[in-house]
């Protein structure tokens, strides 16, 4: 990881951004203290394998009782409520 002074960021911002785009992480310092980090933006995958999808999605499913609760409420409506 490279450290550069805020003055260098101001004077050479394009060159530093090119380095970051190339995969480098740059720490910006003020009076020798690190205050910010420039790092490449992570790219989202265009597709996910079935195994990864199942692992990520199944871990965050809704409460198993929710389907029953929704079925019990499905015949109810809000037609009788006053309009505001």
Image (cartoon, grey):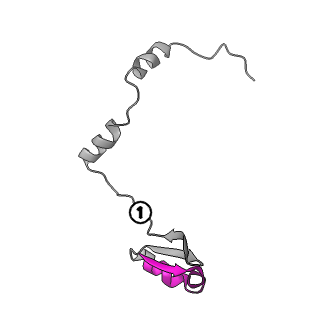
Viewer-proximal residue among 28 and 83: 28
Q: Nearer the viewer, residue 56 or 1?
A: 1
Q: Which residues are magenta?
A: 1-19
Residue 20 rendering spot, x and y as whole percentages = 44, 75
Judge left or right: residue 12 versus residue 80.
left
For the N terminus, the image quarter is bottom left
Task: Please name the residue shown 45% across and 69% down the image.
Answer: 39
Q: Residues within 10 Å of mark 1 (few under 14, many from 20)?
A: few
**Where does label 1 land, which residue?**
42
Q: Position of residue 43 (x, y in %)?
A: 40, 62
Q: Main secondary structure of the magenta part?
A: helix
Q: As drawn, is 41 to the left or to the right of 57?
A: right
Asked if the stretch drawn in magenta spans residue 4, the answer is yes
The residue at the point 26 percent across, 50 percent down is 49
| Residue at point 59%, 79% (across, down) | 6
At a point 40% along the width and 20% down the height, the residue shown is 65
Quadrant where the C terminus lies? top right
* Local secondary structure at mark 1: loop
Query: Which of 58/33 is in front?
Result: 33
For this orientation, the residue located farthest to the left is 51
Q: In the rendered image of this protein, does residue 53 appear above or below residue 38?
A: above
Residue ranking furthest to the bottom: 11
């Amino acid at each position: 990881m490279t450290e550069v002074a805020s003055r260098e960021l101001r004077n050479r911002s394009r060159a530093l951004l090119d380095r970051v785009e190339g995969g480098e992480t740059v720490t910006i310092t003020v009076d020798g203290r690190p205050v910010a980090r420039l790092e490449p933006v992570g790219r989202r995958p265009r597709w996910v394998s079935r195994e990864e999808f199942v692992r990520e999605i199944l871990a965050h499913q809704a409460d198993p009782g929710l389907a029953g609760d929704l079925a019990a409420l499905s015949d109810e409506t809000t037609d009788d409520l006053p309009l505001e």
